[in-house]
Image (tube, rainbow, N blue to C red):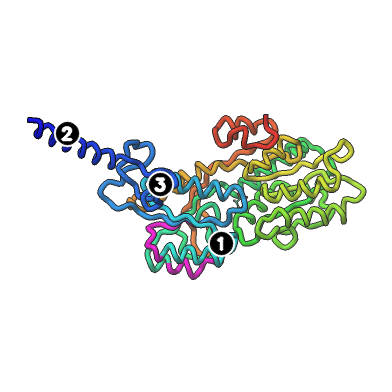
Amino acid sequence: MVKKSIVLVLVLSMLVMLFAGCSDKPAEGGDPTMTDKPTQTEDPGQTEDPGEETAKLVGVTMPTKSLQRWNEDGANVKAALEKKGYKVDLQYADNKQDVQNSQIENQITMGCDVLVIASIDGGALGGVLKQAQDANIPVIAYDRLLTNTDKCDYYATFDNYGVGKMQGEFIESVLGLDQGAEGPFSLECFGGDPGDHNALLFNQGAMDVLQPYIDSGVLQVKSGQTKFPDQIAITNWESSGAQDRMDNLLTAYYGDSNIDVVLSPNDSLAQGIVSSLKSAGYGSDAKPFPILTGQDCDKINVGQIIRGEQSMSIFKDTRILADQVIAMTDAILAGEPVPTNASYNNGVIDVPSYNCEIKFADKNNWKELLIDSGYYSLSDIPDAQ
Ligand code: BGC
């Protein structure tokens, strides 16, 4: 009898141990081969069960870790894909296209089922995209279009022309240009990296609004430099490049008058522009900060908005973009219609695309847009209370 009970207890405790072992989730930072593998989890909200099928592998390449937005994009996409049960290889390329090309080559060799690419120079991936084509791997361009290739299956992005247009309209409205204000107001224009197709669209969108006012003399560009990319592009979107150009402009053209408006396509440039303006003494009653645009709502720039150094920044909710990429990946792999609402010509083909919605943050709405929505917490933002 005693013997029987001991055997029973032993069998029971073995069973308990077995089940406990099965349901144990790999600890964070534990064995990556474990965490990468979608398991039967107790919490279906955490990771979807891929069923009997082996988890598909998605290769994600991001341009650089040096700008806040790409770190967030990479993390969001990875987390959202993993939540759906995919395995993910995420790489950053230090803003070097040849580095990114080798990373993609590796991902092709690894047998990735889908490639998600946020390029550096969208027209310089030719060879590696040909390899993806030969291996029959679908390619989704992420945020930045892949140009001059017939191997770009889908494109998930924000309304890039709309970004520039919104920046131009912001300037138009703050100055009251659409209400007949005659100025003249001084303006200088900056552009993004010439290899990034978005930079062209941002510029087109903004200049379509501002050019008529430049032509009529209400806006005056003292440097005369408005041509993108030749005169105003900033290589690699570097803050230091924008700071140097702003220094030169202020010295050469604004020795005896203040600048009223600076069109900056994004926040990394706006950071350099603000540094330059500060060193030139802007930020006082006699020298107020000019109207300055931006894009991405980087934390540093939200701080600049709060302190009155920058006027606005376009908010691109990267969580929505990540969700869109996941919806595209799901549909592609299931052989179902892929959700699209736009089309971009990349010089060779019309790429079926999805434009996510944009908004802008300024001193009036940043809290509602960025904090109340859960995008940032208040403690993320310098000088926020
Ligand atoms: C993105 C912007 C970003 C810029 C610099 C562009 O392609 O659309 O959001 O500010 O790259 O990283």
- Looking at the picture, how far across and down is residue 304, in whole percent? 72, 40
Question: Of all residues shown, which one is farthest toward the left?
Answer: 1
Tag 1 residue: 122
Query: Relative to residue 129, is residue 44 depicted above or below?
Result: above
- Looking at the picture, how far across and down is residue 228, in whole percent? 70, 59
Q: Which of 351 and 369 is in front in this view?
A: 369
How much space separates mark 1 and mark 2, taking CA atoms? 65 Å
Tag 2 residue: 9
Q: Which of marks 1 and 2 is nearer the N terminus?
A: 2
Q: Which quadrant is home to the C terminus?
A: top right
Q: Earlier in the sequence, mark 2 or mark 3?
A: 2
Name the residue at 70% across, 58% down. Answer: 234
How much space separates mark 3 and mark 1, taking CA atoms? 26 Å
Residue type, label 2: Val
Residue 250, numbered circle: none
Name the residue at 69% across, 39% down. Answer: 312
**Mark 1 crowd level (few <14, some 14–19, many ≥20, 10 Å Cα):** many
Residue type, label 1: Gly
Q: Do the residues labelled 1 and 2 touch (CB within 8 Å)?
A: no
- Looking at the picture, how far across and down is residue 174, in whole percent? 75, 36
Which secondary structure lies at badge 2? helix
Name the residue at 34% across, 47% down. Answer: 38
Which secondary structure lies at badge 1? loop
Residue type, label 3: Glu
Q: Tell us which disc is closer to us: 2 or 3.
A: 2
Tag 3 residue: 82
Question: Of all residues shown, which one is farthest toward the bottom?
Answer: 127
Which contiguous range is marked in magenta? 109-131
Q: Tell us which disc is closer to us: 1 or 2.
A: 2
